[in-house]
Image (spheres, grey):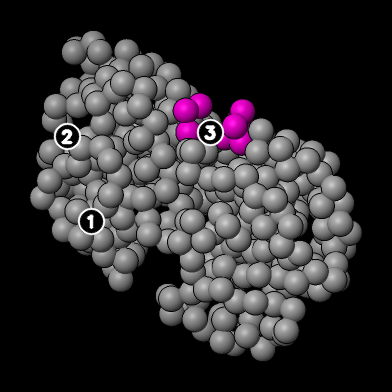
């Protein structure tokens, strides 16, 4: 199969530090290639993912994150170069709405963000001629009239993650510096549990810096160590030494890649049962989910869980090979539906 993957212009694939979508696309591209398929990746020119990349793009533009003009110019160029593939998997928001697709090439897209009522309006229109992938059951459970072709959980390349001993004597928090990620709550949990907290957080956008300065910094004390934004090897070392990942998310996060990253290092997850967390964490086996009053007590309990079992759960349910196989199953179905030349794209995707 010849598969075109499109990702936005703002971060490299894989990302140097923060970037969940780009990290997932990197793992998917590698796994598809290892399975014997031809992959063509449309991404920023400074990306290092070892699959063939569509030429003609500039370097990553993190300072333009979210700008419509940047994304639209990027996806137009991507679609122009994808005429020879069998299927296009677009990981942008604007791309699936582009009218001038290569003729005869079906498109699938993944919802990487929250399926809010406003976003649902766009995805309803996309569903007329695009197969839509959700990344968790929770994500698509909140809007019932968007046609979802498949729910495919993210996966990791476990060859890049080592099993840690969990002997650092601390818990960790990894995420973005914003209220939704629950950093203040993580501080409270660690303090009540009497365990030091190490914090790795993305913090360079204006809102992130303001939130840190005005809300987080005033409450940090000697038991909290702020590491800033760290690389993947540094992140896995941090997670691998931790007693637990404290992840008291405060919103319905569509997946939560950080949880499977921690589990891959053998580190249990202590989190609120928001979003997709119940689809990732098995209570009393790979971590604990509960309210804020429960989480401090779960830290000691998490230290008794099997780190090998945490790792095994990722190997079985959240590995990149499984993720690629699930995508290939969907790609084949979409290509088969799209085959009859007498059908328009809208007819091909009509149930």
Residue 187 is situated, as x and y percent measured from the top left of the image, at: 73, 73
For disc 2, the marked residue is 82
Viewer-proximal residue, 43 or 126? Answer: 43
Q: Residue at x 45, y 23 (%)?
A: 325
Q: Quadrant of residue 343?
A: top left
Q: Looking at the picture, how far across and down is residue 241, in whole percent?
A: 67, 58
Can you say which quadrant of the picture contains the N terminus? top left
- Residue receiving disc 3: 319
Q: CA distance from mark 3 to mark 2?
A: 28 Å
Secondary structure under badge 1?
loop
**Residue extent of the magenta highlight:** 314-322
Residues tagged 3 and 2 counted as in contact (Cβ below 8 A): no
> How far, Cα to Cα, is label 1 from label 2?
20 Å
Q: Is residue 233 visible?
A: yes
Which residue, given by chain and number where applicable, does mark 1 sit on?
A: 46
Q: Residue at x 14, y 27 (%)?
A: 84
Q: Are marks 1 and 3 in contact (CB under 8 Å)?
A: no
Few, some or many residues within 10 Å of mark 3 (<14, 14–19, 20+):
many
Comes first in the chain, label 1 or label 3:
1
Q: Is residue 283 visible?
A: no
Q: Nearer the viewer, residue 51 or 276?
A: 51
């Amino acid at each position: 199969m010849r598969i075109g993957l499109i990702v936005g212009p703002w971060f490299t694939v894989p990302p140097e530090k923060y970037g969940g979508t780009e990290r997932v696309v990197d793992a998917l591209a590698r796994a598809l290639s290892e399975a014997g398929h031809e992959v063509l990746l449309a991404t920023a020119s400074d990306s290092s993912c070892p699959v063939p990349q569509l030429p003609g793009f500039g370097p990553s533009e993190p300072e333009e994150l979210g700008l419509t003009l940047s994304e639209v110019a990027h996806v137009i160029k991507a679609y122009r170069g994808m005429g020879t593939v069998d299927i296009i998997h677009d990981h942008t928001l604007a791309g699936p709405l582009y009218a001038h697709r290569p003729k005869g090439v079906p498109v699938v897209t993944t919802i990487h963000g929250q399926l809010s009522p406003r976003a649902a309006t766009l995805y309803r229109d996309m569903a007329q001629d695009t197969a839509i992938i959700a990344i968790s059951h929770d994500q698509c459970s909140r809007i019932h009239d968007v046609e979802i072709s498949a729910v495919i959980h993210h996966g990791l390349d476990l060859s890049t993650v080592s099993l840690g001993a969990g002997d650092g004597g601390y818990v960790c928090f990894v995420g973005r510096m914003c209220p939704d990620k629950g950093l203040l709550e993580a501080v409270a949990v660690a303090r009540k549990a009497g365990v030091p907290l190490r914090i790795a957080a993305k913090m360079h956008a204006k809102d992130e810096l303001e939130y840190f300065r005005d809300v987080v910094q005033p409450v940090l004390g000697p038991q909290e160590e702020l590491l800033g934004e760290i690389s993947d090897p540094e992140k896995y070392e941090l997670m691998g030494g931790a007693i637990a990942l404290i992840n008291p998310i405060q919103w319905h996060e569509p997946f939560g890649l950080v949880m499977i990253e921690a589990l891959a290092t053998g580190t249990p997850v202590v989190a609120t049962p928001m979003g997709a967390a119940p689809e990732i964490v098995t209570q009393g086996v790979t971590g604990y989910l509960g309210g804020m009053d429960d989480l401090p007590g779960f830290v000691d309990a998490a230290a008794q869980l099997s780190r090998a079992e945490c790792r095994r759960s990722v190997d079985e349910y959240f590995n990149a090979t499984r993720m690629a196989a699930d995508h290939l199953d969907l790609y084949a179905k979409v290509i088969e539906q799209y085959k009859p030349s007498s059908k328009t794209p809208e007819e091909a995707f009509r149930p």
